[in-house]
Amino acid sequence: MSEVGYRMGTVMAIAGLGTLTSPPIGGAIVAKNGGSYGYACVFSGVSYFVALAGILVLRGRIAGWKVANIV
């Protein structure tokens, strides 16, 4: 439990990189596809699920894999 701050800081740093890089990447995807947002939506969805997986792994490592565990 003593590493919670370290681990959350690491996750937030990675999320910060995603926050800084995703809008330009999404804009480039839209520009390449002639203004269509289809592939940009797919990119956003994949990015969301990668982040979700990271947070779930972090939660599992800190509190265990049982749903009822309190962090």
Image (spheres, rainbow, N blue to C red):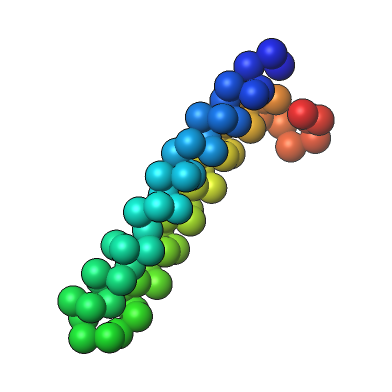
Give the residue at the far top of this rendering: 2
Q: Is residue 53 left or right of residue 64?
A: left
Give the residue at the far left of this rendering: 32
Q: Is residue 41 left or right of residue 56?
A: left
Q: Position of residue 30 (x, y in %)?
A: 28, 77
Q: How many marks?
A: 0
Residue 35 appears in the rendering = yes
Q: Residue at coordinates 42% horizontally, 64% vertically from top-left?
A: 44
Q: Position of residue 29 (x, y in %)?
A: 25, 71
Q: Position of residue 11 (x, y in %)?
A: 52, 35
Q: Residue at coordinates 45% horizontally, 53% vertically from top-left?
A: 19
Q: Quadrant of residue 65?
A: top right
Q: Quadrant of residue 3?
A: top right
Q: Is residue 9 left or right of residue 2?
A: left
Q: Residue at coordinates 56% horizontally, 30% vertically from top-left?
A: 9
- Compared to residue 48, the image places residue 41 above or below, namely below
Q: Quadrant of the C terminus?
A: top right
Front-lying residue, 29 or 67: 29
Residue 43 appears in the rendering = no
- Compared to residue 23, the image places residue 32 above or below, namely below
Q: Quadrant of the N terminus?
A: top right
- Compared to residue 1, the image places residue 69 above or below, namely below
Q: Residue at coordinates 48% horizontally, 36% vertically from top-left?
A: 13
